[in-house]
Structure formats: structure tokens, C-alpha cells
Amino acid sequence: MTEATATRYEPTIPDVSLRIGSTRRAATGGATYVSSNPADESVVAELPAGTAADVDDAVAAARETFESGIWSDLPGAERGRILSRAADLIEADAENLAALESVEMGKLFVDSVNGDIPATAGTFRHFAGWADKIVGQTSVLPSYGPQQRFGYTLRQPLGVVGAITPWNNPAVIAGWKLAPALAAGNTAVIKPAEDASLSTIRLAELLVEAGVPEGVLNVVTGLGEKAGAALAGHEGIDKISFTGSARVGRTIQPRAGDKFRKMTLELGGKSPQLVFADANLDESMPWIAMGNFYHQGQVCAAGTRVLVHESRVDEVIAGLVAAAEAAVIGDPRDASSTMGTIVNRKQLDTIERYIDAGKSENAELITGGNVVDRAGYFVEPTVFRGHNDLTIAREEIFGPVATVIPFSTTDEAVQIANDTKYGLNAMIHTSSLSTAHAVIPRLRVGMVWVNGWGVPEPGLPWGGREASGYGRELGQSGIHANTEEKTVHLAF
């Protein structure tokens, strides 16, 4: 990345029309909504506010395309070739995709261009390799009287997959949902978050450029309570995959569940970081800080409950304070910025309320805690010291607010870690493999990081439990979640 592209890279805004089958059009009734730049509150784009009628049309187009076999009957190796080509195009368009995310939802350009967009390409490349390897199993069965019997299973595409994505990692999470669905031969309708639709719209353009036929991927932008709700409960889809808040997930579950369709729900978390007495803080401290402050804490897997052995509390607090006070808060497209914006005014107000709650409940405010007095939606990275019963330790804030919680024994650390309604992921910091292996099975989460943190790898399953949702994306589990298993008995 050169200096010229690192500083205020200007994205090319894609055609924001609805993508339904082979047509590009406005929303039914012509309604629109505005997407704004959270760094200066300027208008980025005016997008169609899709309706239930638009979702009907998109699902019908996806169904017609699926039944035509133009994609589902294509040899897996050919689907894989197209998805691999899409990965190449995503990489070639990385700066533009990253700038779209920066200008629309405040992610640091450097983090997106070096992290999120390569991860998106990697997800498509990974599932391109799966496309011709979706196989079942065989079994020689006991004879039944004079009959010899043989059994096998098939894994077949579900049909039409509905995907609803959040605003915090739009390209990455769109890739998690679309790449395995398309590799398996499904068609899809995606409803991106209204605060961050542009990189998903551009992603759809690149998939078509790579050779994905029109109608395989349909994009309906709009508000969650209209377009999203219509998609979640649509009779014509075979699966719904949603990433977002537990509050919204609770409304989607009955809509989709009443139709007996498959669901994958990833609903956020309040993840613990367990810092043991023997942790190598020279190596772990950057990860501990990143788990709190990366993307301004707007990450479902953020480790904002920092559980620290009582002998290391002062060191960890000092490290978090140093990271927080070194942050350069500014326009996310500026090369000098190390912390960008909150996505919108509503979310900024929510973070401010949680900070006020921490103060009112007598948590010790160590640093930060202030909204930055400037245009846009900026807040200081914030560190509290407290306990696990605080509101800021119980509820997902989706902002750069860390709560350091001391513990004295391993049993106490595990008890505090599990004392939450969520169960997405956890981080362990220790120099002892024995400690790590002893603690990992006891944590009620879907993923555990040891001495690190980052974007989930596409080759391994990702998902949570309890209020963090259920089902898995990525890895072979991602293929299984987008296929139906059929058992065949042969008698001869």
C-alpha cells in the first residue's frame, strides 16, 4: 500500500439499484434512505428502501434460477473456478472495497485493506476448493434375507438461502454466508445492513464479473424491520442465515422456525479474556488491547471482560491505558488515524449511556469515557476496573469499553467467564499449555483463542451458543449448513 492510497482513498460508489434476477431497479414505491459518513455526517449514497414486494421478487428470481440448474447443476469444479476467480477480483478491488467500508461505517482503511478484504477473498478461495468435494459416505449394510444391501448418502444444495448481514464487518460476513452457500450450488438473497450496504453491493458486482450467473445472487437493500423481516419469514427460502444482535435474533427465530427451515444465528457476545499469572504480557498485551479497541470495539467477538489474575492486574491496566491513550482518533481513511468512528449517532449514544452506567454503579474509571467534541461519531477508548455484576460487564456495548475484573484462582476465573448469557468466544493468555488445555473444555463458548485474537479462519467452524446463537459457519460445518443430507438404501 502506497502513501497515496493510504491517505483519504476515495471509493467508487457502485450502482446501488436493487439486484433482482437480471434486472437492476428501484424499490417498489420508489422509497429510499440515506447512508452517511460517520466521520463527518455527510451523505455517501441514497439507496433503495426495499419492501416485502421486492423481497418476494428477489426470492422468486433466486428460486427460478435454482430450479433452472444453471448454477446448481454446474459441475462443482466449475463453480469452484468461478468462486476462485471472484477471490482474485476481490483482492484486485481491495482498496476500493476497504474505502467503501471506511466511508460508510468508520472502519480504519488500513485494517480493512490489510485484514477484512483479504479475509473475504480467502473465504471465497477456501470454499472454491470445497465445491467439487461435497461428498457423502458409503456403507455396506447387513443383508436382509436373500437381499444384499448397500447404503450411501448425498449432500445436495438446499435451494434458496436468505442472508442478513450486520454493519460492523459487512464484506467479511457476507463472504461467510455467500461463499459456502454458492459453493454448494444454492442461490441466495442477501439483505445487507442499512448502515453498510455498499461493499456488499460491490461484492455482488464482482461475483457476476467472475462468472456467477445473474439471479444466483440477489441483493435487496432496505430497513431491517421491512426488508429484513420479510426475508426472515419468507415462505420461499430454504434457510435463513443471520448475524446481528440477540434482540433481533429473537424476532427472527420464530419467523423462520415456524416454517421448519434451517437457520444459522450468530448473535454477538460479551466475551472474556482470561489473563493468568504466568501470561507473557510482552506478547499478549497487544492482543488484549486489540480485543477491546479494534474497530472501536464494534466487534461481536470483542473480549471486553478482561479477567486478570490479581497478581497482574496493575500491569494489564497499565497496558490497556497505554494503548488507549496512544490512540489517534480521526477519519478512518487518514493514514495517521489508529481509531476510527462509531457507526452512527444512535450507537454513539448507546455507548455513552453504558459509560454513564459504569460510573453510576461505582466502577473505577481508569481512562477515557468521553465523547470527542468534533463532527462525526467519535468516543475515547475507555478502561474501567470493576466486577462481573456491573451492567458494563453483563451487556454487549459494541464500543471500545474494557472492564478489568480481578480473579484469584482458576476456578474463579472459569466461573466468572461462564457467568454470562452469551457464549461466542473466549481468549486465554498463559505460558502453560497445561493451563490452556485444562481451561478450554470448561468454557461454555463456541471458540477459544490462546495467546491471540483475530478474524476467524475460513477452514474452521465459527459460531456460538446460548444468547450468542446456534449453528456454525465456515469450514466443513459451513458446507453442511448449506446442504441437505439424503440417505439411499440399495437392495439387490
Image (cartoon, rainbow, N blue to C red):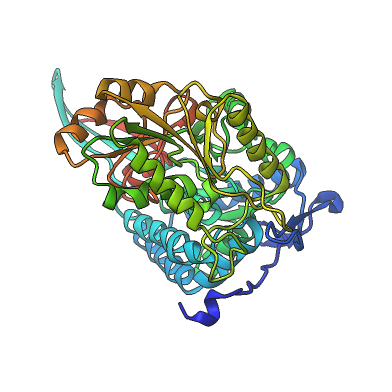
Assign the N terminus to one quadrant of the image: bottom left
Q: Quadrant of residue 347?
A: top right
Query: In the image, what residue occupies the spot 64% across and 54% down?
Result: 196
Instruction: Count numbered badges in the picture.
Output: 0
The answer to which of 404 and 344 lies nearer the viewer is 404
Q: Does residue 79 lie above or below 297 as drawn?
A: below
Q: Is residue 352 left or right of residue 407?
A: right
Q: Residue at x 23, y 39 (%)?
A: 430
Quarter that holds the C terminus: top left
- Give left or right: position of 446 versus 145: right
Residue 21 in view of the camera:
no
| Residue displayed at 75% across by 48% down | 50
Tell me if residue 236 can be seen. Answer: yes
The location of residue 385, given as percent across then percent down, is 47, 33
Would you place residue 363 above or below residue 121 in this image?
above
Q: Which corner quadrant of the image does residue 7 belong to? A: bottom right
Residue 376 image point, x, y percent? 71, 56
Task: Tell me which corner region of the image, top left, top right, bottom left or bottom right, holds residue 232.
Answer: top right
**Residue visible at 64% across and 45% down in the picture:** 370
Residue 457 x, y percent position in the rendering: 34, 51
Question: Would residue 74 appear left or right of 378 to someone viewing this image?
Answer: left
47 lies above or below 347: below
